[in-house]
Image (cartoon, rainbow, N blue to C red):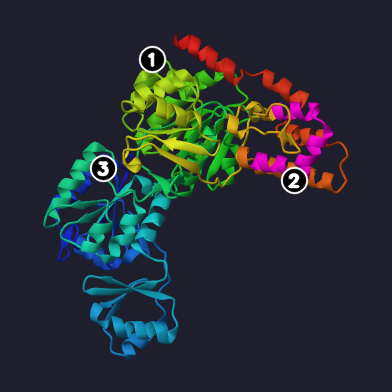
């Protein structure tokens, strides 16, 4: 992640007894000169903070009163929490509790906690008590340094995923948790150090200056972190959840055509979006349009022409926005030309702003096989997700830059060999090939090479999706299943005809088999169960289940046509749709065209 925001606690972190370390002040100025936004985040009352710091113009924004007050250069300020209730202040005075009241916070000695809590309970007020070393702060519920920083970054149009926070005390936990990278100083709270991504060594604020300088020079957040933010991929064979830490790592999702790659990709995209990351999804075939149902997602293209690059850049300057660029109605040559302009623009935008946080390239072999790959992909910042059934066509430099590999069912010998050359240890060829070729539609494997695998190949069942999975027109009808997943037609306990190993074979078999065979399966609900368990298309399974039920009730006489129509309607197999598909270059032709160019 690009380092764009530095959030600093004041007392105990960069200041002692109210006086800020002069080296820290210089380091802050140097960071701002590199266009890093610096936010001072303090529990102090704003007027007190201004007095002890000698003015606040050395930073870009201030979060005071433990998150309740925001202040910006020029004197602009904003109150987030509610002012203290007069009856609360009156009761504190009546009980002779010494306190200071700010615009929102009420501060007193930590030794008064028991009496203050009694006042809060007696008056039934929505307040919380927060300790900061020897002081006690009383605040409205849901107000913290973290919420205050989020509000400040929203106003500045910045993302906490590009932020680093440094703190020292009990009230800094939420501050560090909000930022992508949280640092605790070694001379502060031990509990905070346990939860931090990094512990800054030293014995005082002077050490903070050197840390700021080192990070600012790199312009990237440190790589070492506690992996707080994770993507849940699914469940392993032994029943444990499999999660992937969100780093700036390049992820490859590979597998045969129609093996479930877009399901895995959509699953990761959903979770990133809901965790507040900004994505740009380059959708070659229209698989990810339904991500638009998630907050902050805009879909461009599809029936409309591809968007102008300045329009995309304007959207991506908002840190909580993600975009899907649907190129499904664009010819292969137009796709390539468009990506040759789009990818460098995204790399440049991310270098300057930190956004988008991740770039997803579906059908990556269409675009990233030529020698100009380094002009298209930012190898330094990383954080690409590449989706392909032709891994062997990706440029070799790009294959070397892959950090994480997720594999769906893979049977093509050339692709198997490429996968093994990239990630396999010695003497596992036959074993891994058998695993890759035997994966079900709802399965994938995470290859070793990252900490999450423990050095082993991890086979797992995919987690559920939140948004509907968009299927290509007619694409899944010809999906070739492994033998054990085919539908076996039976009558009186004996198999009849050949097993159907695709939906197209299933439709053809329906027409040739005796009605008595179809009736037996329909009575038992075998058809809908097979579709649900093998294809995981519960919408189609529901439609077929209704056909079976209607037949059992005598409301459907033509069982064959009713079943066939359910499948054809679900996958849009009308002649008009098929004619429209023929206007664009299909998967096989596109793959062949690229392979010829690459050679």
Q: Which residues are magenta?
A: 505-532
The N terminus appears in which quarter of the rendering? top left
Question: Is residue 519 covered in magenta?
Answer: yes
* Upstream in sequence: badge 1 or badge 2: 1
Does label 2 or label 3 sit earlier along the sequence?
Answer: 3
Quarter holding the C terminus?
top left
Q: Main secondary structure of the magenta part?
A: helix
Residue 325 position by quadrant? top right
Task: Give the SS element for disc 1.
Answer: loop
The residue under the point 15% across, 66% down is 17
Instruction: Name the residue that disc number 3 marks.
Output: 222
The percent coordinates of residue 492 (x first, y second) are 76, 38
Q: Is residue 121 above or below residue 546?
A: below
Q: Residue 176: which quarter of the image?
A: bottom left
Eyeballing the image, is 135 above or below 162? below
In the picture of the structure, the residue carrying the numbered disc 2 is: 524
Judging by the rendered image, the residue that carries numbered circle 1 is 371
């Amino acid at each position: 992640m690009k380092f764009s925001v530095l959030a600093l606690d004041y007392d105990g972190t960069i200041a002692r007894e109210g006086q800020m370390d002069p080296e820290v002040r210089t380091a802050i100025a140097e960071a701002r000169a590199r266009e890093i936004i610096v936010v001072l985040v303090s529990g102090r009352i704003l007027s007190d903070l201004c007095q002890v710091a000698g003015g606040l113009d050395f930073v870009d924004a201030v979060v005071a009163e433990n998150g309740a007050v925001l202040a910006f250069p020029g004197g602009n300020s904003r109150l987030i929490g509610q002012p203290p209730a007069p009856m609360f202040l009156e009761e504190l005075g009546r009980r002779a509790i010494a306190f200071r009241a700010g615009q929102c916070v009420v501060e007193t000695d930590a030794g008064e906690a028991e009496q203050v809590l009694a006042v809060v309970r007696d008056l039934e007020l929505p307040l919380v008590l927060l300790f900061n070393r020897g002081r006690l702060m009383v605040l409205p519920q849901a107000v913290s340094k973290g919420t205050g920083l989020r509000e400040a970054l929203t106003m500045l149009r910045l993302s906490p995923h590009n932020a680093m926070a440094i703190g020292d005390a009990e009230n800094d936990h939420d501050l560090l948790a909000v930022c992508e990278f949280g640092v605790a100083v070694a001379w502060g709270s031990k509990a905070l150090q346990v939860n931090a991504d990094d512990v800054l060594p030293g014995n005082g604020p002077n050490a903070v200056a050197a840390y700021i300088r080192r990070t600012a020079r790199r312009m990237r957040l440190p790589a070492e972190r506690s992996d707080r933010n994770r993507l849940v991929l699914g469940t392993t064979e032994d029943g444990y959840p499999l999660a992937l830490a969100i780093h700036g790592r390049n992820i490859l999702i590979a597998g045969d055509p129609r093996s479930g790659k877009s399901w895995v990709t959509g699953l990761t995209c959903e979770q990133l979006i809901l965790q507040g990351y900004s994505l740009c999804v380059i959708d070659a075939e229209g698989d990810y349009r339904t991500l638009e149902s998630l907050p902050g997602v805009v879909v461009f293209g599809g029936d409309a022409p591809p968007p102008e690059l300045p329009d995309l850049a304007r959207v991506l300057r908002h840190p909580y926005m993600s975009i899907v660029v649907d190129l499904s109605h664009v010819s292969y040559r137009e796709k390539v030309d468009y990506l040759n302009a789009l990818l460098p623009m995204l790399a440049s935008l991310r270098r300057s702003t930190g956004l988008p946080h991740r770039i997803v390239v579906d059908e990556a072999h269409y675009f990233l096989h030529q020698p100009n790959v380094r002009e298209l992909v930012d190898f330094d910042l990383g954080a690409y997700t590449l989706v392909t059934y032709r891994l062997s066509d990706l440029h070799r430099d790009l294959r070397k830059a892959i950090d994480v590999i997720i594999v769906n069912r893979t049977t093509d010998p050339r692709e198997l060999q490429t996968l093994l050359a990239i990630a396999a240890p010695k003497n596992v060829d036959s074993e891994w090939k058998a695993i890759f070729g035997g994966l079900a539609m709802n399965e994938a494997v995470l290859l070793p090479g990252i900490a999450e695998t423990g050095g082993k190949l991890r086979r797992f069942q995919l987690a559920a999706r939140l948004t509907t999975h968009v299927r290509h027109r007619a694409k899944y009808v010809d999906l070739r299943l492994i033998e054990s997943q085919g539908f076996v037609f039976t009558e009186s306990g004996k198999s009849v005809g050949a097993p159907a190993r695709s939906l197209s074979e299933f439709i053809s078999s329906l027409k040739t088999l005796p009605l008595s065979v179809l009736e037996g399966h329909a009575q038992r609900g075998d058809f809908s169960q097979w579709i649900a368990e093998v294809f995981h298309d519960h919408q189609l399974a529901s439609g077929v289940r209704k056909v079976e039920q209607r037949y059992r009730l005598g409301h459907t006489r033509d069982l064959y046509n009713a079943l066939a129509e359910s499948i054809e309607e679900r996958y849009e197999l009308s002649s008009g749709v098929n004619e429209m598909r023929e206007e664009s270059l299909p998967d096989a032709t596109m793959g062949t065209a690229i392979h010829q160019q690459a050679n």
